[in-house]
Image (tube, rainbow, N blue to C red):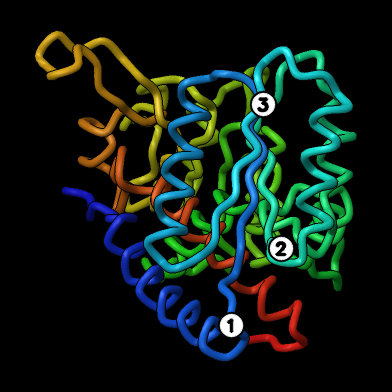
Amino acid sequence: MSAQIIDGQAIADEIRTNIAAEVARFQAQFGYPPGLGVVLVGDNPASAQYVRMKRRACESAGMKSVGHILPASAIQAEVEAAVKALNDDPTIHGILVQLPLPPHIDEPTILSMVSLEKDVDGFHPINIGRLAMKGREPLFTPATPTGCMVLLERMGAQLEGANAVVIGRSNIVGMPVALMLMKANATVTVCHSRTRDLPDIVRRADVVIAAIGRPNYVKGNWLKPGAIVIDVGTNQIDDPTAPRGYRYVGDVEVATAQEVAGAITKVPGGVGPMTITLLMQNTLKSAWRSVGATT
């Protein structure tokens, strides 16, 4: 078996074309574009690069993008002031606080400050709480887990009654995507660093979401033949043959996994482009909601 490669970039490009058309329609109707505000604290290179990518993507779709870039030495009050400024700005419809924040910043407090109506990253406690409850729906769901779900939908995954294994229990990916899978009526097992007999658990999965942050961790012989594998990992490893001396790999060992899986995401080019795209989609959704429309 040779797995079908899930091209997240191609799917994201298709969605972004639709987003750009909707942004133009919004601009034409109201005279201003949807706006995304970003708060970045510190000089983490990966976070800074991610924020630049988000800003470029927004601008290419015609959205307004505003950044509050603070040094790692910023104090709690300065970060809170940046969030408040974006909350109070009527031209900003979505707010993203880039995680992780420096250790001296109270992350739960900062995330709780983001206006519920502008929480396009879906991390406000009320949005997460609604996601966890039957019969309740959040205003927004986190972008990366939502991207995983869209990829599964595009692959025609039959989630109802399926066995799904999520490897990783972070607040950013693992826990939200597990909740979303449960709402899709999958039977979900969440695994982590303390899980016993992890390969045996993964072998029973029809769907595997790998989000543990360890390069090439999940091996092909862990997988059930035909399983759909969504690899969220983006890990930098040394590679003297690469132009920059390094390259990026996922949490799944693709060389062995693609001989067993039915489908597997590209890394890079799989979940990453979907994350930015769904963030833009949430911002557009918020902009329409701000004027009393759903689309």
Residue type, mark 2 in image: Phe
Q: Which residue appears at 49% of the width and 77% of the height?
A: 23
Q: Quadrant of residue 248?
A: top left
Q: Nearer the viewer, residue 251 or 46?
A: 46
Which x, y percent locates residue 113?
Answer: 88, 45
Name the N-terminal-most of marks 3 and 1.
1
Residue that badge 2 annotates:
140
Q: Quadrant of residue 255?
A: top left
Above or below residue 224? Residue 136 is: below
* Residue under the point 84% across and 37% down: 81
Q: Nearer the viewer, mark 2 or mark 1?
A: 1
Q: Position of residue 97 (x, y in %)?
A: 69, 40
Residue 40 vs 166, above or below: the answer is above
Q: Is residue 286 left or right of residue 9?
A: right
In the displayed structure, 199 sits above or below 272; it is above
- Which residue bears the numbered disc 3? 70
Spatial distance from mark 3 to mark 2, Cα to Cα?
A: 26 Å
Which mark is first along the chain, 2 or 3? Answer: 3
Of residues 65 and 9, the one drawn nearer to the viewer in this rendering: 65
- In the rendered structure, which disc, 2 or 1, sits on the residue that comes first in sequence? 1
Where does label 1 land, which residue?
A: 31
